[in-house]
Image (cartoon, helix red, strand yellow):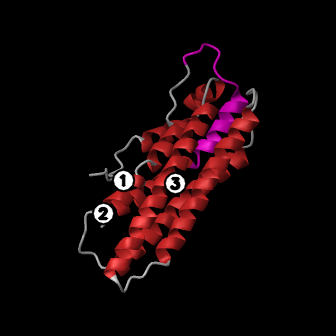
Amino acid sequence: MNKKLAAALSGGAVLVATLSGCSSSSGDKGPDPKLVSWAKTVCDAVPAQNTKIRTANAAIAAIATDSNLPPKSAQKTYVEAFQNLADGYKSLADALDGAGAPPGVDGGAKLQQDAAKNLAGLSTSYADLKKKVEGLDTKDQGKFAKGLKEVASQTKEVGKQGDNGTQALKRLEQGKVKEAMGEATSCKVAASATAQPTGQATSG
């Protein structure tokens, strides 16, 4: 029904993949066990939330190709998808908040806080989009379509937030943190999960 909206959401899984797509350490000594434990705490949350985010994006991608779907059904799908996106990013933010600063990393506290703040902001933005969709007039096809266009425009702005979130996570995942994530079993599981196809729509 709205390919622009689906395309605007396609960056979601990229952000999650960034959180877990780390390679193993090639050093002889290996990372600090405390830091590996920290990485495990963060990555433990990724697979479940990644599934939630991927499912939401896939639902929107599917609805984007169905021009015959009644507005009320489309609204329900979008509302559920935005709720799942909001919940998924909030859980990831909470995981980073709960883990605290990565031990033994210079400036780690600020990097961790910046990443968590970005994820929490994304969650709030998707919750706002959910409210917007809930308020659309489903009795009038034209008004509903117009409202969805406005939502799609706002979703692009949220996409820029997602880009900022990706950069914040990349800054966090450097050096010692990257090595630790390469050693943590749950990070390897998370990286494997995020590497699977997402079935997201592309703009066209």
Decide: few, some or many residues near mark 2? Use Cα within 10 Å; few <14, some 14-19, many ≥20.
Answer: some
Eyeballing the image, is 44 above or below 33? below
Q: Residue at x 56, y 66 (%)?
A: 127
**Marks 3 and 1, how far apart in space?**
12 Å
Q: Residue at x 55, y 40 (%)?
A: 186
Give the residue type at disc 1: Ala
Eyeballing the image, is 126 above or below 41? below
Going by the picture, which residue comes out furthest to the top? Answer: 28
Mark 2: secondary structure? helix
Give the residue type at disc 2: Ala
Q: Which residues are magenta?
A: 26-45
**Marks 2 and 1, how far apart in space?**
9 Å
* Residue at the disc numbered 3: 158
Give the residue type at disc 3: Val
Residue 29 counted in the magenta span: yes
Residue 76 placement: quadrant: bottom left
Q: Residue at x 58, y 49 (%)?
A: 45
Residue 27 placement: quadrant: top right
Decide: few, some or many residues near mark 3? Use Cα within 10 Å; few <14, some 14-19, many ≥20.
Answer: many
* Residue at the disc numbered 1: 7
**Marks 2 and 3, how far apart in space?**
18 Å
Q: Earlier in the sequence, mark 2 or mark 1?
A: 1
Of residue 54 and residue 73, the one placed in the foreground of this image is 73
* x and y percentages locating residue 39 in the rendered image: 64, 37
Q: Nearer the viewer, mark 2 or mark 3?
A: 3
Mark 1: secondary structure? helix
Q: Are marks 2 and 1 in contact (CB under 8 Å)?
A: yes
Eyeballing the image, is 72 above or below 13? below
